[in-house]
Amino acid sequence: MDQASVPIQIKPKDYKSDIKPVWCPGCGDFAVLNAITKALAFMGQPREDVALISGIGCSSRIAAYTSVYGFHGVHGRALALASGLKAARPGLTVLVAGGDGDGLSIGGNHFIHACRRNMDMTYIIMDNEVYGMTKGQASPTTAPDWADSKLTPRGSGIRPFQPAGLALTAGASFIARGFTGDPNGLAKILVSAIEHKGFSFVQALSPCPTFRPEQMDWKHQVRGFEAGATSDPIEAAQRIHADDGMSTGIIFRREYPVFRPGTGIDSGLGSIESEFTK
Ligand SMILES: Cc1ncc(C[n+]2csc(CCOP(=O)(O)OP(=O)(O)O)c2C)c(N)n1
Ligand code: SF4
C-alpha cells in the first residue's frame, strides 16, 4: 500500500470545534458531544460529509461545539431544518440534536411527522426532563409531581410523554435509549443509528445537575434492556410500556420505506422551477 492510499485516521477530538462548551460542570450534554465525536471517528466519517442541526436550549448548543457543518436553529424547528437540508443534499449524513422541551413540546408536531416520514437522519433528544436554558420549568417528560419549579410549585399534574413509545406509534424505524453515564454505549448506539437507513430516534438520558440534581442518581437506576432490538412493533410497544424508562439499548429496528423527496409523487415543483431557469 502506498502512502497516498493509507486512510487518514480521524480522531474523536478532530470533530470538536475550538469553542469551549458553556454547559454547567457535570451536565450530561458533555457526554453526548463525546459520544457523537466517538461515533463519527469510529465510522471514519469525513467532516465535510456530516451536518449537525439543532434547535434552541442548553443541549442545542452542541452544534457549535463540533467541527462538522452545523446550524444552531430555531426553538423546536431543528427537524424541519434538517429535513430541508436532507432533501437538498441527500448525500449528507444528517444528525439532529436538542432537548426534550425543544423536540417534544414546541417541536412535538415536527417530531411525530419526522418519525412517519422516515427520512434518513438521526435525531438525538438529550432528555433531562426539564427546560434547562430557561432555568428549570417542567417539560413534556417531567413527572407530574416534580415540584421544584416556581411555575409549578405543586407539580404540573400532567402525565409525561414516553418518547420511545411516541416515536414507535408515529412510525420511527429505529428507536433506542442511551445514557450519558455510559458514553461508549451511547456511541455504539449512535453508530447503529447513523448506519440505519431511515429515521433513527435516540433518547439520550442526560442529567441536568443544576435544575434536577436528583438525576445524578440515574447511574444507579439505568440498566440494559434484557432482550436485544426487535423488529416487531407490538413487542416493542410492550417492552417500552412495561419498562420504567431507565432501560437502555436499541429497542426497535425495522426497514420501512425511506422518504426521499423528489423520488415520490411529482409535487409539480420541478416544472415551476424550470419556468424560472428558462
Ligand atoms: C419560539 C421560542 N419559544 C421559547 C423560547 C425560550 N426557550 C429557549 S430554550 C427553551 C427550552 C429549553 O429546554 P430543552 O429543549 O429541554 O433544552 P435544555 O435547555 O434542557 O437542554 C425555551 C422555552 C425560545 N427561545 N423560542
Ligand atoms: S442548566 Fe442543566 S442542561 Fe443547562 S447546561 Fe446546566 S446542567 Fe446542562
Image (tube, rainbow, N blue to C red):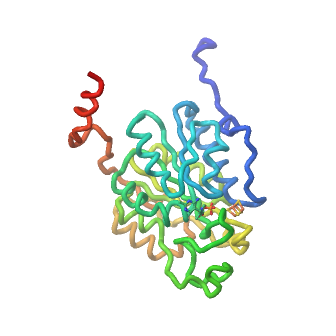
Residue at point 55% right, 53% down? 55
Q: Position of residue 96 (x, y in %)?
A: 52, 49
Q: Is residue 181 left or right of residue 177?
A: right
Where is ligand 2, by quadrant? bottom right
Which image quadrant for residue 218?
bottom right
Near-viewer residue (10 or 275): 275
Name the quadrant of the N terminus: top right
Residue 121, placed above or below residue 277? below
Q: Position of residue 157 (x, y in %)?
A: 53, 85
Q: Is residue 132 left or right of residue 258?
A: right
Which residue reaches farthest right?
A: 25
Q: Position of residue 153 (x, y in %)?
A: 65, 85
Residue 175, placed above or below residue 197? below
Residue 180, placed above or below residue 257? below
Which image quadrant for residue 237?
bottom left
Q: Is residue 75 left or right of residue 14?
A: left
Which image quadrant for residue 8?
top right
Residue 28, placed above or below residue 136? above
Which residue reaches farthest top?
A: 2
Residue at point 33% right, 46% down? 258
Residue at point 73% right, 72% down? 213
Residue at point 57% right, 40% down? 70
**Residue 189 visible in the shown view:** no
**Residue 18 visible in the shown view:** yes
Q: Is residue 12 left or right of residue 167?
A: right
